[in-house]
Structure formats: structure tokens, C-alpha cells
Amino acid sequence: MRSFVQGKAGRLHVEVAGRGPRSVLLLHGAGGDVSHWAETLPALARDHWTVAFDLRGMGESDAPSDGSYALADMVDDVVQVADAVGFGRFVLVGHSFGASVVAAACGRIPERLLGAVFLDGTGDVRGLPEDALQAWRASMEPDRYAENVRDWFMQLLAPATPATRARVLGTLARTPREAYVGAMLQLFAFDPAAAIGGFAGPKALLAVRSLDGPLSLRQVVPDLPCTFVDDVSHWLQLDRPDLVHAALERFLVDLPAP
């Protein structure tokens, strides 16, 4: 069911499906929208109450009236959506930048979480050299943004299926520059390990093996239970929705009653 929830800074586009013993909320990455869960949402909804929503400024959600893409405000949006649909405690699943929102939620609203799942999440980038950060900022200037961000996505999409490539590039093209850059800027001051440490409940990471490096979430939170996925792009839930769904079901079945 498609609907809208009024957040603190604008309307948020929400997709709701299924009923069941567990409540699951899905968060896409920067440059994406709810269509990145096109296979995962209905699969989970067969047995669980499942919700996905477009992050502020992306998909059909409003650009924030206050201009903020802060992770804390993204977590507030999660709470607004969860409250609006009637969730109590829930499992929060995030891909890419969405995984950073999940990490922030671990630190800010641990009492609302039944579990936290990270799909190929970003690690700690606070230590990037200043010259690298300045080069990235320059590459995101309006006259250079479209070409540079597409080039970056094409690198991450190298092993992707044609359908995944088309979907991801399509949602990227529809994402306003301000939303993508505003979200990415949050990561340069974010400590994911400290935030994740705020939630003592069940957690899991699905990581793309070919992208495992010093800036991956696995490297900065080594005690996070991790399952590697091979022969997929960064958008593993689109390349191998069957595998991702199976991993999520294994995580959900082991959870205590809400």
C-alpha cells in the first residue's frame, strides 16, 4: 500500500505490505528510492509486516523544508514512519547510506530496535586526508556533479546485472544533487562504530566481498557478525534478491519475540 507520512521537514513516501510477528523497516541508499527493495519488500511481506520509505529529498519524499540531511534527522524520519504505521519495536535494515542511518539509529533509538541489519554499509571515513575530501567536494560542484557521480556509480555497478544497472542509474538521475551531496556529507563526521555500540541487540552485516576494504563497515566494526556475498555489485539486494531475502529470514527467525 502506497501512502505518505508527514515528517518534521516534509512528506515521506511510504510503502507498506504484509502482516506478521515481526515488523521490518527498509532504508535504501543515497541516490535510491523504495524501488531498490522491489523484490525484497514483497518477499518479506509474505511473513512479516514490512515497510520501506523514500529518504528525505529522494524518490517521492519531499526535500526537507529545513534543508537538513543530518543523520539524526533521518533517524527522526524513521521514528515518524514507524509511529505512523503502528510499529512498536522493529527490525531496521539499511543498504549503503541507509546502513549509516541504521547505525545512527542504534545510537539514538536503541529502545525501538528489535534488530539491525546492514547491507554493504560504509565504514569510518573521518580519517580521509583533507586533500581527498577537498577533491571530492570539488567533484560534486554543480557543473561536475552529474558526470562524476555517474562515473562512481558505474564503478560500483561493474558486476551488476543489466536490470540492476538500469534501475540504479535511473533512480540516481532522478535524485536531486542537493539530496545526494547532503547525505554523503554526513558521513565525513560520523563514527559508525560508536553509534552501533549503542545497541546491544541482534545485528548482522551482509558485505560484498569485492568491496571489502579499509573503509568498509566490517573493518571498523570487526565484531559485527558478517556474511560475505560474492559476484554481486554494491546493490546486492537487486542483483541477488533471493540470497538477501534468505539471509534476512535467517536473521528474523532467530530473534526473540517483540
Image (tube, rainbow, N blue to C red):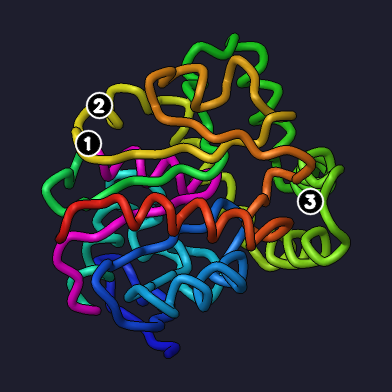
User: Is label 2 in a helix, a strand or a loop?
Assistant: loop
Asked if the residues shown at circle 2 and circle 3 are in contact, with their CB atoms under 8 angstroms apart, the answer is no
In the displayed structure, 1 sits above or below 251; it is below
In the displayed structure, 251 sits above or below 2; it is above
Question: Can the viewer see residue 172?
Answer: yes
- Amino acid type for the residue under numbered disc 2: Gly
Q: Disc 2 marks which residue?
A: 197
Residue under the image location 22 percent in, 36 percent down: 107
Task: Give the CA separation, mark 2 to mark 3.
Answer: 36 Å
Question: Can the viewer see residue 178?
Answer: no
- Amino acid type for the residue under numbered disc 1: Gly
N-terminal-most mark, 3 or 1? 1
Numbered label attached to residue 248:
none
Asked if the residues shown at circle 3 and circle 1 are in contact, with their CB atoms under 8 angstroms apart, the answer is no
Task: Give the CA separation, mark 2 to mark 1.
Answer: 7 Å
Q: Disc 1 marks which residue?
A: 107
User: Is label 3 in a helix, a strand or a loop?
Assistant: helix
In the picture, measured across the screen, residue 166 lies left or right of residue 215, that is right
**Mark 1 neighbour class, 10 Å CA radius: few under 14, some 14 to 19, many 20 or more:** some
- Residue 80 sits in quarter: bottom left
95 is within the stretch colored magenta? yes
Can you say which quadrant of the picture contains the C terminus? bottom left
Can you say which quadrant of the picture contains the N terminus? bottom left
Residue under the image location 40 percent in, 55 percent down: 67
Q: Which mark's residue is nearer the viewer, 2 or 1?
A: 2
Q: Disc 3 marks which residue?
A: 146
Asked if the residues shown at circle 2 and circle 1 are in contact, with their CB atoms under 8 angstroms apart, the answer is yes
In the picture, measured across the screen, residue 192 lies left or right of residue 167, that is left
The residues colored magenta run 85-107
- Amino acid type for the residue under numbered disc 3: Ala
